[in-house]
Amino acid sequence: MQIKYYNSLMVLMFLLLLVISCKSDAQDGIASGGNPIRVKTAVEGIKAKINNLLDTFRLQSEERKAFRYIQGVVTDSNAGLSGDRTYSDSEFYDLLVGLGDVRLREIIKVYLDIYKAKKTVETDIEGVKEDALKQQLKYGLEAEESFYLRELKQVFNESTPGEVYNKAIDMRNLNKFATVKASIRQISELEELCASLSDDESRVVWYMRSALTNSNIARGYGYSTYSNDSFYSLFKNNLNDARLKEIIGFHIVHVKALYEAEAVIKDIKKEGLRLALKGRLGVQKYGYSSELKRIFSPFSFDQIYNKAIDSNANSNTNSAAEFTKIKNDALDIIAAEQGNP
């Protein structure tokens, strides 16, 4: 009897050890990067649940694309600002259930409106003729898009579905891409004004705009920095004044020489020589732009005209001559590189 009891006890102990060993092996496999079947199944399971929920909500193709973008933002720890909440897939699923289809659709519509506004702005930017201005506008659009991405991430910082919904709906009141839109409008209006000018005259106007609206030029001298609106108004209000064309005419030779020098320098193959001449040209360009700011500092057109006449007659520096000298030095370097000293 004791032998039978002893044998039964040994069998039970053996089975218990076998179970413990199997459980330990399974845990070690997951911890050491073995075959985490359960983890993988759980991840796939939550994604399937989200997809099933979207099917239940009957989201259309465009809505699904917007949803995926939102999901990508709120589940990405690198999106937004430090301290913003990042959802796990399961937390995001729970939020969707709490929102329901009606409120989720309204949140998606808010984002779609922003997306469509962005696409419209992108199309308008492509219509801008000046490549440099087009690139500036693209940078501005990227900056504003980053702002909306941060706002979207912060919407989901709220702790309840109702709070998330209310904050998302408030995004409807944002003036979508207002800064870039205003810049495009001003540039388009200026392009229309320049249509009555020659190519050389138009090039001068655009260069003047780039100098006079740049607050980094002649900083500390007390010269005026124009806004895009004030620059546009100056030219619009005086376009039919012969004196404006006279001022523009003074600067055709300078701007033309500057752009010619820039074009030639780009063809220098040796980087060190190219950068050295580019630096020399940059110094002269800054000086010329500073002089433009000095001339245009008074907002009275009569004063601007008088300063322009005085500068043209009595300036100690001939910017066109300096630009041309740098261009000729660049041509000499290119000739030497090609074996034609």
Image: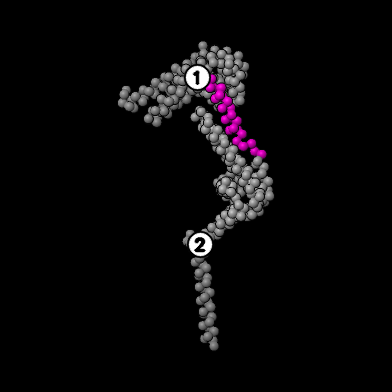
Image: 246 above or below 282: above
Residue at 54% of width from left, 86% of height from top? 2
Between marks 1 and 2 in the image, the one whose residue lies nearer the viewer: 1
Q: Hey, which residue is sitting farthest bottom in the picture?
A: 1
Residue at 66% of width from left, 50% of height from top? 102
| Magenta part, dominant SS | helix
For marks 1 and 2, the one nearer the N-term is 2
Q: Position of residue 249 (x, y in %)?
A: 51, 16
Type of amino acid at the residue the image marks with label 1: Ser
Question: Circle 2 is placed at which residue position?
Answer: 37
User: Can residue 185 be found in the magenta stretch?
Assistant: yes
Callout 1: 10 Å neighbours few (<14), some, many (20+)?
Answer: few
- Magenta segment: 173-200
Q: Position of residue 127 (x, y in %)?
A: 53, 31
Question: Circle 1 is placed at which residue position?
Answer: 198
For the residue pair 99 and 317, the one nearer the viewer reads as 99
SS label for mark 1 = loop
